[in-house]
Image (cartoon, grey):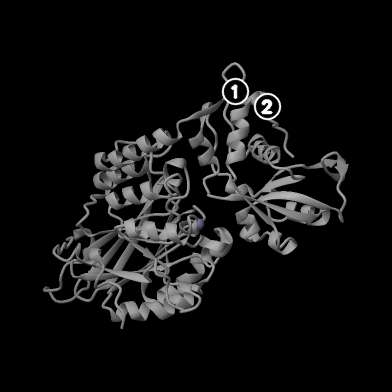
Amino acid sequence: MTTYSRNYPKIVRHTLLVVLVAAAALASCAPTVETEAADPMRITVLYTNDEHGWIAADDRRGGAAGMLARWRENEGYVEDGPFLVLSGGDLWTGPALSTWFEGEPTVDVMNEMGYHAAVLGNHEFDFGRDGLRTRADQAEFAFLGANILDSASGAPIDEVLPYVIEDIGVVRVGIIGLASMRTPRTTMPTHVAGIEFADYAATLERVVPEVKSEGADVIIAVTHLCEEEMRPLVGTATELGIAMIGGGHCNERIAEVAQGVALVEAGWQFAAYGRVDLTIDPGSGKVLDVAVALKDNPPGTPDLDAEAIVARWQAELDDELQVTIGYTEDGIKRNSAAMANMLMDAWLAAYPADVAMSNPGGIRQDINPGEITLADIVGVLPFDNTIVDVALTGKQVLASYVHGSRRPAIAGLGQSGAKYTIGDMPLDPDAIYHVLINDFMYAGGDGYLFAEYDPAGYMTGIDWRQPVIDWITSLRTTPNDPLENYLDTEPR
Ligand SMILES: [Zn+2]
């Protein structure tokens, strides 16, 4: 039988340290048996999810270095103590500090923080399989995904392990990863071609016995699942003896015990973390009690080593990206009409087409007041997408525009009374129009149907940020003539 723990370097981390936490307060929970019964021991899980590359502190969050300091001071965290540090995925796609380097800074600092394992989020595929492989090689923690299967072989893809087993004192903890079955619709679909994301409960039913046969006493599931998908797994978890389910993806805040199973999801962006305490009878390995809490990570005193890593990457980024391209007096909000209009107008200005549209989920960050740099634009559009030119009928343009619960950022398509217009003309449902979209949408991301409408869409190869950078640069804006003078702030 395959074992996924024996050759794993982290497995020895705890073996020399039998840390028994004498918990007097837990005496009432202890088995009322003979006096030689060992005191219960406690294993503490520190849990984050959807870190999204927010390793630097700002005025709202303490960042990775702040969180590590908080763990040490408030939770008594030591790397070789009875702790497990786990992540629910979506580690690195976010601000330029992480995205520009394809996530390397985030994995660097997570190594320093002592993570043991992270399940793959959908965004772990944003830089393709090669990008994922590079990060997996760099990480000193395991990338997990028991249900991420190679379609051809049916085995987990090379970049992940289905589970790891960590020895903490005399207790063996099996940590199983579950990725979201929706991953092909929430990352570039071409990046997950040939991969199947298998059913959650069926995967647990298959893998838990294997983990137990490897000697695991305690089982934890680390998942990239939102609450609506985590909660239905509680019954399965209870049956299989899973003590905790960690979630991710929806950036929710969950800390509760349901039918004896700890459920935890800790917001996102290193703004909070979960603490789960498992009280265990070291003799039988039985979990006697679970407790869960959510804690915030506001700005605070950072851990110096982690801060040095962040600072080193920030210096590298500064060198590359602190080129000023313009000036905004008030800044531009991520979800504003001004932002959506600017991005799409810039696309249409750069490339001959009738309409530009881009999914709102791809616009990720505000532009702050003051000088605008390349880094700001990378932060607004962190994903490495390119522009695709598709030919659509007027009817298909409209169907795409109203598809989904949020309207895409749009340019070229207007409304005059109850009628839609393209350019200055009424939209003709049967006419053919050229529409600029991004390659995420073209590949079927967010459920768009562009490839069905136009299987011969033209991949322009243009980085979707480049027209925006070019447009802002061309205006030569200054404090006396800020970008505000050129923005269309009217919702479309
Ligand atoms: Zn996600």
For label 1, the crowd category at 10 Å Cα-Cα, with few meaning under 14, some 14 to 19 and many 20 or more, is: many
The furthest residue to the bottom: 1
User: In the displayed structure, does residue 146 sit left or right of residue 65?
Assistant: right
Q: Position of residue 376 (x, y in %)?
A: 51, 35
Q: Nearer the viewer, residue 79 or 254?
A: 79
The quarter of the picture where residue 31 lies is bottom left
Earlier along the polypeptide chain: callout 2 or callout 1?
1
Question: Which amino acid type is marked by label 2?
Answer: Tyr
Q: Which residue is mark 2?
A: 486
Residue 251's tag is none
Q: Does the rendering let one see residue 16?
A: yes
At a point 57% along the width and 18% down the height, the residue shown is: 479
Q: CA distance from mark 2 to mark 1?
A: 9 Å
18 or 446: nearer the eye?
446
Classify residue 25 by image quadrant.
bottom left
Q: As displayed, is residue 274 above or below residue 30?
A: above
Q: Give above or below for 484 relative to 29.
A: above
Q: Residue 131's x, y, as percent?
A: 43, 57
Judged left or right of residue 215, residue 479 is right
Which of 298/113 is in front?
A: 113
Residue at the spot x=52%, y=71% of the render? 194
Mark 1 = which residue?
477
Mark 1 belongs to which amino acid? Answer: Thr
Q: Is residue 270 above or below residue 254?
A: above
* Number of numbered discs visible in the structure rendering: 2
In contact (CB < 8 Å): disc 2 and disc 1: yes
Disc 1 secondary structure class: loop
Q: Is residue 453 left or right of residue 146?
A: right
Q: Secondary structure at mark 2?
A: helix
